[in-house]
Amino acid sequence: MSKKKLGLGAKILIGLVAGIIVGAIFWLAMGAEAAGDFTAKWIKPFGDIFVNLLKFIVVPLVLLSIMDGVISMGDISKVGKIGWKTVAYFLVTTAIACIIGLIVANLFKGAFPVLQLAEDAAYEAKTANLMDTLVNIFPSNAIAPLANASMLQIIVIALFFGCGILVAGDKGKPFGNFISSFNEVTQKVMGFILALSPYGVFALMIWVVAAQGPKILQSLALVLLAAYIGYIIHVVLVYSLSVKAFAKMSPLTFFKKVFPAAAFAFASTSSVATLPIAKECADDMGVESEISSFVLPLGATVNMDGTAIYQCVAAIFLAKCVGLDLTLTQMVVIVITATLASIGTAGTSGAGMIMLAMVLEAVGVPTTFIGIIYGVDRLFDMGRTALNVIGDVSCSVCVHQWESGDLKPAKK
């Protein structure tokens, strides 16, 4: 009998645990500053190489997979049906995430410490303007969004060209066949890169643990706890109920199958970089490729439930740190602004920190004080990115059920 090979999820888990152990050894042996400098110089670059490779494949993957997904539907009306259901799912879950974040933060507010304010923080707040966000979704040329990895604009380009191929009929078929072929090649290249994921996770986790260490958690332990409680509540309450009620899938089965994507998202802090693994997980659950190819890239850009929870918790925490008590009206503003900010947040590492400035400005908290929380943003980012990715996959499962009926898991 041949030996059973370890799956990608098991390999990523091994890399994750091994990275934590090795990082802790560095931190204990060298001290936080020396360990952080050493691992940032000699170990983190290997993780960066892997993340760079993922980012390299993400733009063609998103562009081609969405176009191929639209083409494979064969009916432009079906694109519209899947699109509105996907966006509606994301908007509802993001709004719920904001409410959960505010409730948890207010429960912890009385215990939040008043921290020494960082004087060197300098962030330029961005105005959460609905019309500006809407205008910026639509590109003024076809090349800049690809060069700048502007995911919302890339999705718009893919939708327009995919629909154009369908409407063109027989004359569009040669170009459609080229897109399908190019997408297949891209998927193979993605497979080569995915094989490196356990090593990338290993290198990134060594750096995180060695640089941060347990000491960094002491002053911000409560706000971290509040955020992660919010993350867990959202996963258990919203995603479990969603897959059970809408997809008729056991939550335990769902979480087991989505684990590889969640683990990589936790280590890489990039929902866009996690796209290839997320698609593999969705396909393994039986989601039709044309649906996962459409829903997941869209979700990596507009579905930011974890980011929304983080922004709400961080806003309450920072307001307390600077002596501000937010009113109910201001908290409603946080929900609206955080939802809008989350939709505009790039699916890359650390993007949620910049968007937090929008939420703080909307409720009158000086954005300078983002520096208070900056030191541990990576630890927030890990949890919120994993939550975002789980939400993307849950949406693809639900949309499949609404469109195609019972899931048929892929045979191994």
Image (tube, rainbow, N blue to C red):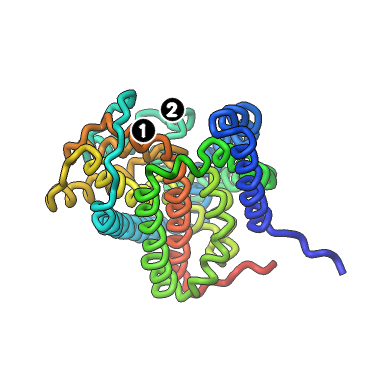
Residue at 38% across, 42% down: 219
Mark 2 residue type: Ala
- Figure quadrant of the C terminus: bottom right
Asked whether 366 or 188 is in front, the reply is 366
Q: How many marks do you count on the picture?
A: 2
Q: Callout 2 environment at 10 Å: few (<14), some (14 to 19), or many (20+)?
A: few
Residue 385 place in picture, x, y as percent? 45, 48
Mark 1 residue type: Pro
Q: Is residue 303 visible?
A: no
Q: For mark 1, what is the residue?
A: 139
Residue at 66% across, 58% down: 10
Asked whether 362 or 282 is in front, the reply is 362
Is disc 2 in contact with disc 1, using a CB cutoff of under 8 Å? yes
Callout 2: helix, strand or loop? Answer: helix
Q: Most extreme residue toward the right, as rendered?
A: 1
Residue 108 place in picture, x, y as percent? 28, 55
Residue 188 place in picture, x, y as percent? 67, 46
Asked whether 273 or 286 is in front, the reply is 273
Q: For mark 2, what is the residue?
A: 144
